[in-house]
Image: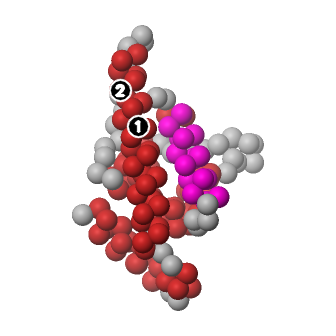
Amino acid sequence: MKLNELNEILRSLILNKIENGWIKSQIGKILLGPSGQAQMNRFLSPNESGIKINFGIKPLQKIARLLDYDATIIFIPNNKSEINQAVEECNMRFLSELSIALDNFIKNNFTENIIKNNSKSEMDEIINSIIEEEIK
């Protein structure tokens, strides 16, 4: 699985969550930390030239660590379809687990009252503490 393919699937997964009512800033903070919203906005929306900006290895590593995975780079010789297949299966399993974890996390940790009753800095602290608990 190539980096562009992985990014497209991840982009579709996140856009699907947003279409189903989840808030983009919440997803950005969960996946990328308190300052993740700007990076999430760039990832989800094409730039003024219509080009989609993909996540590189650092944001992907940050996302992977949420579920106790490692994001690594692998160089595969041409015509090694069995290796490609294994990598793709592992990536798809991760993306499936990520989707489920996002749903569970958001459903269990965000309510309108929490969001409406706190300032931005308090919200960042709440999200960070929740994420830290989930990672442990």
Image quadrant of residue 21?
bottom right
Question: Residue 77: which numbered mark, if any?
Answer: none
Q: Is residue 15 above or below residue 123?
A: above
Q: Is residue 70 above or below residue 99?
A: above
Query: Residue extending furthest left?
Result: 136
Magenta part of the protein: which range?
Answer: 5-19
Q: Position of residue 133 (x, y in %)?
A: 29, 69
Question: Residue 86: which numbered mark, if any?
Answer: 2
Q: Secondary structure at mark 2?
A: helix
Residue picked out by circle 1: 91
Query: Residue extending furthest bottom?
Result: 117
In the image, what residue occupies the spot 65% across and 43% down? Answer: 52
Q: CA distance from mark 1 to mark 2?
A: 9 Å
Q: Label 2 near label 1: C-beta < 8 Å?
A: no
Q: Amino acid at mark 2?
A: Ala
In the image, what residue occupies the spot 39% across and 49% down? Answer: 97
Q: Position of residue 117 (x, y in %)?
A: 53, 89
In the image, what residue occupies the spot 51% across and 79% down? Answer: 111
In the image, what residue occupies the spot 39% across and 44% down? Answer: 94
